[in-house]
């Protein structure tokens, strides 16, 4: 309580300096510095929400002074302070019902993105801010919205992979599969255009995830796009083990073929055995998908 009262006193004293007085302009630059100093004091006392408020006021001062770089710096710092405040509340089991800190963070980052708009050379920074906010928000509608914004501004592998993961965590396998399919087509066109790099690792991960998603969804042939039908066809015939464009070892390829055949024949015993054998080849997300696949097929 004492720290809060001390903060309010200092905060009001600084704010009063910004009030217009007869024949005297307020010293906005000095007020900005004092807000930033007070934010540092609040941060040291773990009053993150108050630190965010001070940084937000410092950003408004810089906007008045038309210092866009300083304004952006303060806006981003303020958003991060509000995110820390929100996380700490959740860590102690007292999340805000109105999510005030989350909304304040979204507002700060959103305003920073708006200020970056039409600024030459700010695309990467804008996409990075949207991705940072999305990672803090987690697999929520708001988090997905920020990821889509980041990808629209400047697509990165991390943003696309995160978007796929968020859809999977929400159980939206259709959207996850569509994004993966578009991403694979983009990477393949990039390779065909002469790009160099270890893209086989990316395509390998996407391929396995696409196979698992397709097996979970079990789309009818009429609703299956030709490119997705080809994904499963590669594993439908044992003779095609030589068709390996994704740097996949022979054992993993054979296990995926066995998985596809076991699903098509509804061989539940084989599925249970394959789960253990495939385990070493899958990442954490793919393991969850495989477990989900077995659950779906078992209850049918």
Image (cartoon, rainbow, N blue to C red):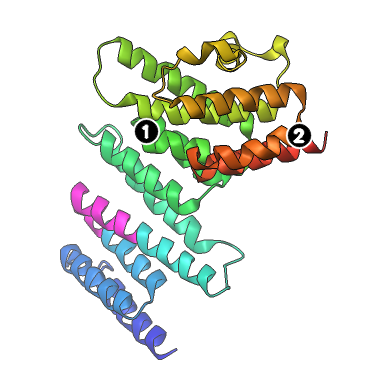
> Which residue appears at 33% of the width and 31% of the height?
154
Left or right: residue 159 compared with residue 90: left
**Quadrant placement of the C terminus:** top right
Callout 2: SS: helix
Magenta highlight range: 60-78
Query: In this view of the protein, can residue 67 be seen by the observer?
Result: no
> Which residue appears at 53% of the width and 68% of the height?
90
Q: Nearer the viewer, residue 88 or 242?
A: 242
39 drawn magenta? no
Q: Position of residue 46 (x, y in %)?
A: 36, 77
Left or right: residue 22 compared with residue 236: left
Q: Position of residue 67 (x, y in %)?
A: 18, 50
**In the picture, residue 213 is in which quadrant?**
top right
- Residue at the spot of label 1: 157
Q: Nearer the viewer, residue 268 or 99?
A: 268
Residue at the farthest bottom position: 2
Say which label, 1 or 2, has the lower sequence index: 1
Mark 2, residues whose alpha carbon is within 10 Å: few (<14), some, or many (≥20)?
A: some
The numbered disc on residue 268 is 2
Q: Nearer the viewer, residue 123 or 179?
A: 179
> In the figure, 91 relative to 168: above or below?
below
Q: Nearer the viewer, residue 247 or 99?
A: 247
> Which residue appears at 43% of the width and 27% of the height?
249
What is the spatial separation of the Cα atoms under label 1 and label 2, in whole angstroms? 35 Å
Left or right: residue 179 compared with residue 170: left
Mark 1, residues whose alpha carbon is within 10 Å: few (<14), some, or many (≥20)?
A: few
Query: In this view of the protein, can residue 265 be seen by the observer?
Result: yes
64 drawn magenta? yes
């Amino acid at each position: 309580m004492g720290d809060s009262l001390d903060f309010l006193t200092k905060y009001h004293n600084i704010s009063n300096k910004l009030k217009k007085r007869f024949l005297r302009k307020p010293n906005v630059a000095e007020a900005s510095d004092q807000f930033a100093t007070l934010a540092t004091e609040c941060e040291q006392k773990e009053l993150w929400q108050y630190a965010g408020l001070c940084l937000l006021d410092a950003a408004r001062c810089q906007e008045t002074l038309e210092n866009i770089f300083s304004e952006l710096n303060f806006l981003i710092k303020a958003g991060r302070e509000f995110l820390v405040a929100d996380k700490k509340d959740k860590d102690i089991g007292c999340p805000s019902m109105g999510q005030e800190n989350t909304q304040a963070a979204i507002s700060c980052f959103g305003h920073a993105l708006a200020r970056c708009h039409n600024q030459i050379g700010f695309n990467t920074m804008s996409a990075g801010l949207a991705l940072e906010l999305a990672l803090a928000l987690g697999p929520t509608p708001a988090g997905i919205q920020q990821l889509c914004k980041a990808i629209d501004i400047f697509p990165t592998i991390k943003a696309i992979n995160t978007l796929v993961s968020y859809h999977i965590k929400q159980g939206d396998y259709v959207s996850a599969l569509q994004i993966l399919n578009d991403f694979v087509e983009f990477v393949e066109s990039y390779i065909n255009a002469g790009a160099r790099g270890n893209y086989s690792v990316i395509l390998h991960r996407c391929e396995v995830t696409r196979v698992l998603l397709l097996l979970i969804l079990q789309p009818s042939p009429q609703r299956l796009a030709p490119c997705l039908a080809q994904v499963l066809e590669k594993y439908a015939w044992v003779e095609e083990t030589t068709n390996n464009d994704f740097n996949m070892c022979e054992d993993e390829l054979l296990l995926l073929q066995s998985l596809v055949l076991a699903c098509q024949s509804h061989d539940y015993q084989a599925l249970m055995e394959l789960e253990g054998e495939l385990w070493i080849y899958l990442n954490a997300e793919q393991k969850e998908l495989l477990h989900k696949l077995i659950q779906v097929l078992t209850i049918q």
